[in-house]
Image: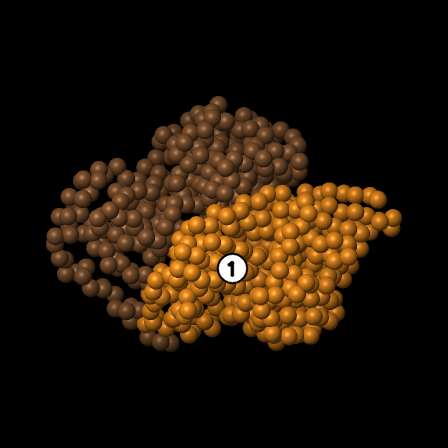
Chain colours: A orange, B brown
Amino acid sequence: MKKSIELIEKIEGEAELHCAYGTDGRVVDAQIQFTSARNIEKILQGRDPKDALIINPRVCGICNHAHLIATVRALEACYKSVKISQKSQICREVTLSLELIQSHFKWFYLTIMPLLGFKPAIEKALKPSRIAAEAIAAFAGQYPHNSYAIAGGIVSDITPIELINAKERIEALKKLFKESLIDADPALFKECDKIETMLKHRGDMPLAMAKIIENGWQMMGKSEDRFIVFAEGAFKKGKSIGTRVSTNISTGHIKEESIKRSLAKRVLYKDRGYEVGPLARAMLMKTALIKESHRKYADSIFSRILARVCEIPQLIIYIESLLHRLDLSEESWIDPGEFPKRAVGAGVVEAARGSLVHKVEIEEGVIKEYNIITPTQWNLGSGDIEKPGIAQKALIGLKNSDPIELVLKSFDVCSVCTTH
Amino acid sequence: MVEKLQQNRILWLSSLTCNGNSHSLLNHPNLDLLLQNIQFLYHPLLPSRYRLKEVIQNSYECEILVIEGSIDPTLKINGVKMIDVITRYSSIAEVVITAGTCSTFGGIFSRSNEKASGLHFREEKRTEDFKNIWQKSISLPGCPVHPDLIFKTIQMILKGLYIDLDECRRPKIFYGWTVHDGCNRNEYYEYKIGHHRFGEMEGCMFIDHGCRAPFTRGSCNKILWNGINSKTRAGQPCSGCTEPDFPAFNLWETKKHMGIPAHAPLGVPKRAYISIAGVAKAFKIERFEKRILKKGSAVEKKH
Ligand code: SF4
Ligand code: SF4
């Protein structure tokens, strides 16, 4: 059997992709292996629970804020009850959504476009992500790696100045979205349900999508067609088998398993693998355009890439509606009282690449166990030939001449998160 | 420290990292100017001349080597030990920059990994492995390092300007003063007004909430983050992320001895601090006693 090992680079670190090919030249098995581990969970043991707010963003340079929000939710879940103002709730949602936007821009322009043969457009990636980072910093002090969300709210007093600073930048993001990604109003994405209508607009997104069709890749990268979303806010929680949605899910059914030879663990929900991320979220929200894409091209790279880019306008609209409701006269922080000496708590959040789960166990006032389950573990955790992981399944059946790297990176692998 | 470089080739290598320094650099507003003047042989995010695989297998000429992440001698990428790759390129490069606290002092990821350390330090302690390149090293700690610090350091190197370094090889221009310098809570600090409450602009976090800025070297409050803010300005106590002991324990509380912060400001004798604090506290200053901004600043009404 022919085998190949590729070093996959620029995925927030690296991973090795081991492929085995059958006699017809198609991938029969694909193993994704990560080679470093940083053991962040171990660093937390024995510490004051609040230290996790500082340490956990350092799991990941690109989704650090999602790790912060997951941490604060896990810590708040340790209290019998915590009151937090709508103002701080809104701020957290806004900064989290901004992080998703910067990540989506970077991924589309630095990862996807070059793999489709377009010249890398660095400024188109970096300008919007820089502006999104500034808007986060207006509320949170800095980006990346702030810890402005604490049990009971946020540390900052949001005055009209911070608000203006953030709003100006959100306006700028909207403009950039139109200028570079697609020449259409974000609101269009609420109704538009025709791929052709979208493709007719000017912009890099229609160009990229047209290129996938032109290359005949639109049906590639199909996987299990099972989706799961754990956190709400901008999105809807639930699982979807194909288009059959059920909203009754609980983090209690998540199980982590070690994988031979790889330092990452895979995750299952009731013993089955699920895809997480923008496509999963769009399937649960029944976003018109993505539903149409799924009907035509199933859970292929076409749908996956389109779903991620289409989250940008959706998030911009979400942020605007939140800021519209922001009442500055509310408290930023309400003292939640002494941290419980003994408790367990879980926090979930939708990070750019999908659901992120943090679980903490407190004993004698310090962290006894901390457990982080990242989106890439859902999508990339390898399985075996009988029960392949999500990305594995997407790769199996591809020929050597097919866009293997594109299929893998359509999930936006994050090495550092996976090997936290 | 070096003559003006002939060529401007930068190689960015990562060891045990979160990639935070790479992403942080991407936030620099003038990155495009830098990219016009230099060439990245490899950068973990930006388009680069070579693939990492090629960098690992070959020895390319380069002028500046940037290292991100704790150095773990057992870490292998593509079957090759990263430490060997770092050793090889650090002898080729004319300048070696450690970007971030991990590659400088070991940082977060050396806390769960006894073998991992910074290039020249494991926390405070000097290590020997890279002794021979000490003279060409520049330390830029920070978790992550502020993008402008990397940016300006590279500019200074490219222009052949003299960079004044301290005993840890940090540029003094960035690390000679503390993070406390420039915080907009300074007035409260001066008069030792604690009563800081999270969610408010008023009050200093040194007294109760663990602010480490007075003994943390860095420029966060002068060269603002993302051009507009800083953690302490926003209301998050400085966690000392540029220091060898980062991350210390109990980062949200000030450790005290008999009501006095146990850790005095950088270079200030304890006794001096206690006397000054005593004097400052003896006065009740009306202006600082109550909030200056009304709750929620009350300026903007509900929309
Ligand atoms: S110093 Fe901080 S930002 Fe840099 S790699 Fe280490 S944890 Fe990440
Ligand atoms: S909050 Fe920290 S940085 Fe600001 S004045 Fe007080 S000690 Fe200095």
Quarter of the figure that contains the N terminus of chain A:
top right
User: Where residue A406 appears, x then y in whole percent?
Assistant: 69, 53
Horizontal placement of B263 versus A318: left or right? left
Depicted B94 relative to depicted A420: above or below:
above
Asked whether A275 or A372 is in front, the reply is A372
Q: Where, by quadrant of the figure, is residue A376 drawn? A: bottom right
Q: Is residue A69 left or right of residue A189?
A: left
Observer-nearest of B248 and B99? B248
Q: Circle 1 marks a residue in which chain?
A: A
Question: Can you say whether A341 is above or below A85 in the image?
Answer: above
Residue A184 visible from this viewpoint: no
**Image location of residue A150, percent across then percent down:** 39, 60
Which residue appears at 47% of the width and 42% of the height? Answer: B111
Residue B244 percent location from the top left of the image:
40, 38
Q: What residue appears at the point 47 percent right and 26 percent down from the top-left corner?
A: B128
Which residue corresponds to the image point at 38% horizontal and 76% vertical from the top-left?
A: B303
- Location of residue A237 (image quadrant): bottom right
Extreme-right residue of the structure:
A23
Amino acid, disc 1: Lys
Q: Along the line of sight, which residue is nearer the eye, A378 or B26?
A: A378
Q: Is mark 1 within 8 Å of ligand 1?
A: no
**Of all residues shown, which one is farthest toward the top?**
B132
Q: Secondary structure at mark 1?
A: strand
Residue, x 45% and y 29% (percent of image)?
B127
Residue A404 image position (x, y, % from top left): 73, 51
Pick whichever, A207 or A311, lies toward us.
Answer: A311
Count of residue discs: 1
Q: Is residue A154 visible?
A: yes
Q: Residues within 10 Å of mark 1 (few under 14, many from 20)?
A: many
Q: Residue under label 1, please give it.
A: A359
